[in-house]
Image (tube, rainbow, N blue to C red):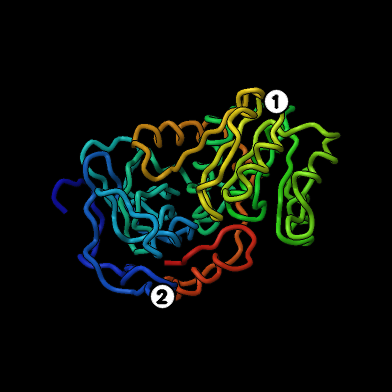
Amino acid sequence: MNGSKNIMNIPEKMKAIKIKEPGGSEVLQLHHKTVPKPGFKQILIKIAFAGVNRPDVLQRMGLYQPPKDASKIPGLEASGTIVALGSGCSRWKIGDQVTALLPGGGYSEYAVTHEDHALSVPTSLSLKESAGLCETFFTVWSNVFMRGKLRAGETFLVHGGTSGIGTTAIQLASVFGAKVFTTAGSDEKCKFCINLGAHHAVNYKTTDFYKAIREINQDSGIDLILDMVGGEYIQKNIKTLANEGRLIQIAFLEGAKQEINFSEIMLRRLVLTGSTLRPQSDLNKSNMANELRQHVWPLIESGRIKPVIDQVFPLDDVQSAHKGIETDHIGKILLSI
């Protein structure tokens, strides 16, 4: 591997998943591909486990194109062992075990990423458990705490409390002193969210979350809302916000277009914002990783926060993994490489 240093014995070819064409889970197919070479400030990871996330599903459907310089192989997070270092690397050494945010390529035996986008596997977790950390923790921390500036004593609502994002957001917001509200699709899931740290959980299939939260919260609004649903939720979220409240949008499962009255935003001094993680610069992602090392990794090390794992599928059963994330599940779905 020219341009890299400190190389272990690495094969020329690897197993990887390709998207044959846009479509359902059946378009995910196993094939063999050349092992990538780490470039400047990049590390090559021999992957043990990889996370399966909603952006992977959208990419499979042809609705979410990877950046031009990213691998076309899906997969935005993984855990494993560093087996090669590109030029300019100084943070890691060969043999270190890491969990990493990837620009793509997680559904394979080897993947490259910027060295600053990897974090040490917490001593409290296995390689399997740590594979489900980065995509959700980078997303939640950067949006809820860096962008949304959630503070102790504030009220916080996250929709989809049993998703990977939801289970992460509930734990983080609760540990940092917020009063946490969430929505989930069954009474059983609501109970799970309460056990995870939420103060109140609303079954959105049987109850109007706006009315329920206003009643529970003594007709007061919510300071910060994290939403990935969109659609009709956009206007309901705005109504649910307290004066000077903040709405952060990170996805649109029910659509990105909705008619809203901006005079309410002006009169009540609301903030509407959002972000997507994958297209952001290496520097932005490095800053997120540094914040996680400082503020969150000690909490994981101590066992106060732990990823919720639903199921683990072998790489060659990736189609079942995608069917799983599109149906009823609680927490993260992983691939075993």
Q: Which of 160 and 42 is in front in this view?
A: 160
Q: Which of 176 and 302 is in front in this view?
A: 176
Query: Could you give the CA–CA distance between mark 1 and mark 2, rounded to whole angstroms?
Result: 50 Å
Q: Where is residue 262 in the image (x, y as percent from the top left)?
A: 58, 31
Residue 331 appears in view: yes
Residue at image mark 2: 316
Quadrant of the image occupied by residue 253: bottom right
Circle 2 residues within 10 Å: few <14, some 14–19, many ≥20: some
- Residue type at tag 2: Asp
Q: Classify 93 as above or below 310.
A: above
Q: Is residue 245 left or right of residue 214?
A: left
Q: Which residue is drawn at 61% across and 57% down?
A: 331
Q: Where is residue 41 in the image (x, y as percent from the top left)?
A: 26, 39
Give residue 243's mark.
1
- Residue type at tag 1: Asn
Image quarter (top left, top right, bottom left or bottom right) of the N terminus: bottom left
Q: Residue at x 57, y 51 (%)?
A: 125
Residue 297 appears in view: no
Circle 1 residues within 10 Å: few <14, some 14–19, many ≥20: some
Q: Where is residue 204 in the image (x, y as percent from the top left)?
A: 73, 55
